[in-house]
């Protein structure tokens, strides 16, 4: 039970990518551009990587301990 | 006729079809059982699951439609990126829980779960029918992807001759799905992804180099889109539509029967969690593919048929033999999800309609037999739709499918956490969502899934599916409160709280060790 509560606590980390990508006013702009990509594009692509990292982190943090 | 490209295309296609037939012998199991044919024996490990779900999530239609939307309207088409970002946290939280309860009770379909959890035959049937209806046009659209590449390859002719290649492709698909079940898309997904990633890497290096770099591509696209009321930066007016479309699509995707089938075939709940960390690699590929829309603008591709944007771009700027590789990637990228979708629809039919209403005493062998035959019928139906009905209708139906499938969310996702929802409330909520969602789509003549809601004097544009599911949920909550207060019988829950929990790998060890991959 304790294990599951701890796991559920980590799930709150998942709120970050929701806010970061579902609120377009945060990133719907052209500058700063990066390698020819307007901000809007490289910001979203960066978040693809970050969501994988967050999932991976939660995966390892919730590793069952013997 | 582009012979060089055509020959490469055909050779790759034949090799992959061969893999589909070989799949019957791969990780041998008794394919006369539904669990083996329709779920691959529930023992796919991390890597196979990755390829299988990748084939589910990113279909040929995605590869064709997303860049086409970006080509047509600009930044709004990029909603596919936040959509394929937020889908993973949702998947991480929801799907392992669904996997555990389905494993504990040998459930094969989402409707099975509703039946066991809410003891409601009518709600289970509603979920099964919604799933089948939403999946059918999705299969048909995969064929549109194949048709697009065949057109650009220069296959001409009249009547039957013109459609013959498509017919052959689908006959092959139908045959190997019949013999190999879910093992076929699992194995062919591997070949598909090798081709897809190769194509994307080459395309995003070669095409921008030829077109003068990404900076130039964005600049040309920006000027061009301004003339057609599009924009490469999202306009504030579209924020609501963009966000609700991304969020609603993410939930809807996880409710599609083929995605649930792909998830349930994993070997453990932990396999699914692990996959959410590595599946975003496909989203990066999708973002790059979306940018092909801008590259097409910069390359001066001009077509009214949006599904031809990407094939025409590749044909114009890549060496012809490589176009064969790229087109094979699209065609095989259509076969993989089409196979999983037809299997998922067949599982629903056989478990929740045939067994429920026709032969309650059906053995798992009989279920598998029915599912195999239905998988053939489903594909034949999709083929007829594509050949006889204008493509636009399939796209409209797919838009509706997305709206409909989301209406099963309160029961399936909500049911994983609570049984406070009353079974009758779920059914009424589902009906309200289906009817209102369809009305909203009809009000915009099915041309878009964005609906402008006028509420309390405010104008709110958003994804119709999200509005419908909010109404659905409100009805479910209010009616549940009333029915529970009145102590109306709510059936018996066949699942227990422990079925949903669990840590680490499944305690029941898979019968066959994961030797390959």
Image (spheres, coloured by chain):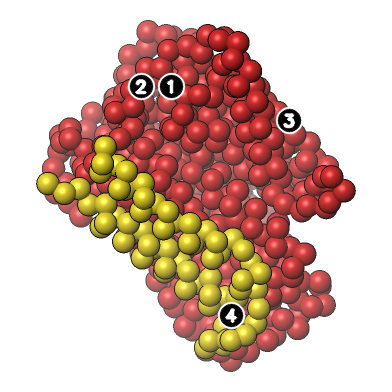
Chain colours: A yellow, B red
Q: Quick check: B174 left or right of B36?
A: right
Q: Assess whether mark 1 and mark 4 are in contact (beta carbons under 8 angstroms).
A: no
Mark 3 vs mark 1: tell me if same chain.
Answer: yes
Closer to the camera, B461 or A7? Answer: A7
Chain label for disc 4: A
Quarter in which the N terminus of chain B is drawn: bottom right
Circle 2 residues within 10 Å: few <14, some 14–19, many ≥20: some
Per the model, the C-alpha gap separating discs 4 and 1 is: 46 Å
- Is residue B286 among what the camera can see? yes
Per the model, the C-alpha gap separating discs 3 and 2 is: 31 Å
Closer to the chain start, of discs 1 and 2, is 1
- Residue carrying label 2: B495
Q: Quick check: B436 left or right of B514?
A: right
Chain label for disc 1: B
- Residue carrying label 4: A39
Task: Looking at this view, name the residue that lies furthest to the bottom.
Answer: B212
SS for callout 4: helix
Closer to the chain start, of discs 3 and 2, is 3
Q: Quick check: B161 left or right of B320?
A: right
Q: Assess whether mark 2 and mark 1 are in contact (beta carbons under 8 angstroms).
A: yes
Per the model, the C-alpha gap separating discs 3 and 1 is: 25 Å
Q: Which numbered dot is residue B435?
A: 3
SS for callout 1: helix
Using the rendered view, name the quadrant where residue A25 is placed.
bottom right
Closer to the camera, B37 or B11? Answer: B37
Q: Assess whether mark 2 and mark 3 are in contact (beta carbons under 8 angstroms).
A: no
């Amino acid at each position: 039970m304790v294990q599951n509560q701890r796991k559920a606590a980590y799930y709150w980390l998942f709120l970050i990518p929701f806010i970061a990508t579902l609120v377009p006013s945060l990133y719907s702009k052209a500058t700063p551009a990066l390698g020819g990509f307007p901000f809007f594009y490289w910001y979203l692509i960066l978040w693809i990587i970050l969501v994988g990292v967050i999932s991976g982190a939660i995966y390892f943090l919730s590793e069952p301990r013997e | 006729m582009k012979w060089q490209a055509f020959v490469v295309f055909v050779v790759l296609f034949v090799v992959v079809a061969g893999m589909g037939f070989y799949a019957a012998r791969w990780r041998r199991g008794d394919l006369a059982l539904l669990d083996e044919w329709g779920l691959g024996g529930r023992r796919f490990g991390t890597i196979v699951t990755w390829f299988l779900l990748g084939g589910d999530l990113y279909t040929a239609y995605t590869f064709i439609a997303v860049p086409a939307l970006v080509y047509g309207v600009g930044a709004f088409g990029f909603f596919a990126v936040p959509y394929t970002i937020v889908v993973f946290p949702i998947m991480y939280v929801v799907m392992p829980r669904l996997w555990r309860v389905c494993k504990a009770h040998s459930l094969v379909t989402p409707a099975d779960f509703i039946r066991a959890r809410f003891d409601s035959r009518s709600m289970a049937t509603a979920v099964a029918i919604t799933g089948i209806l939403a999946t059918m046009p999705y299969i048909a659209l995969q064929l549109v992807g194949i048709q697009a590449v065949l057109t650009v390859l220069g296959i001409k002719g009249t009547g039957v001759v013109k459609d013959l290649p498509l017919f052959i492709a689908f006959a092959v698909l139908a045959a190997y799905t019949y013999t190999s079940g879910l093992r076929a898309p699992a194995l062919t997904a591997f070949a598909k992804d090798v081709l897809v990633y190769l194509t994307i890497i080459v395309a995003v290096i070669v095409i921008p180099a030829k077109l003068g770099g990404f900076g130039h591509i964005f600049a040309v696209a920006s000027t061009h889109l301004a003339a057609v009321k599009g924009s490469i930066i999202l306009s504030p007016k579209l924020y609501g539509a963009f966000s609700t479309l991304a969020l609603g699509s993410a939930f809807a995707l996880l409710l599609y029967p083929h995605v649930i089938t792909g998830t349930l075939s994993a070997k453990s709940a932990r396999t699914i969690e692990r996959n959410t960390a590595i599946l975003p690699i496909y989203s990066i590929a999708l973002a790059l593919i979306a940018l092909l829309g801008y590259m097409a603008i910069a390359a001066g591709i001009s077509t009214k048929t949006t599904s031809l944007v990407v094939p025409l771009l590749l044909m114009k700027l890549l060496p012809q033999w490589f176009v064969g590789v790229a087109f094979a990637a699209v065609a095989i990228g259509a076969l993989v999800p089409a196979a999983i979708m037809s299997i998922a629809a067949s599982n629903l039919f056989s478990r929740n309609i045939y067994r429920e209403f026709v032969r309650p005493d059906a053995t798992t062998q009989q279920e598998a037999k029915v599912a195999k035959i239905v998988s053939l019928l489903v594909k034949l139906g999709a083929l007829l739709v594509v050949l006889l009905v204008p493509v636009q209708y399939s796209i409209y139906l797919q838009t509706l499918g997305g709206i409909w499938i989301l209406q099963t969310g309160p029961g399936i996702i909500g049911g994983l956490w609570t049984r406070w929802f009353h079974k009758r409330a779920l059914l009424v909520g589902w009906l309200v969502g289906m009817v209102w969602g369809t009305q909203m789509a009809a009000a915009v003549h099915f041309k878009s899934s964005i609906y402008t809601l006028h509420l309390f004097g405010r104008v709110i544009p958003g994804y119709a599916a999200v509005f419908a599911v909010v109404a659905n949920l409100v009805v479910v909550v209010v009616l549940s409160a009333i029915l529970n207060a009145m102590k109306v019988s709510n059936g018996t829950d066949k699942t227990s709280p422990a079925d949903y929990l669990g840590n680490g790998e499944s305690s029941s060890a898979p019968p066959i060790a994961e030797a390959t991959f």
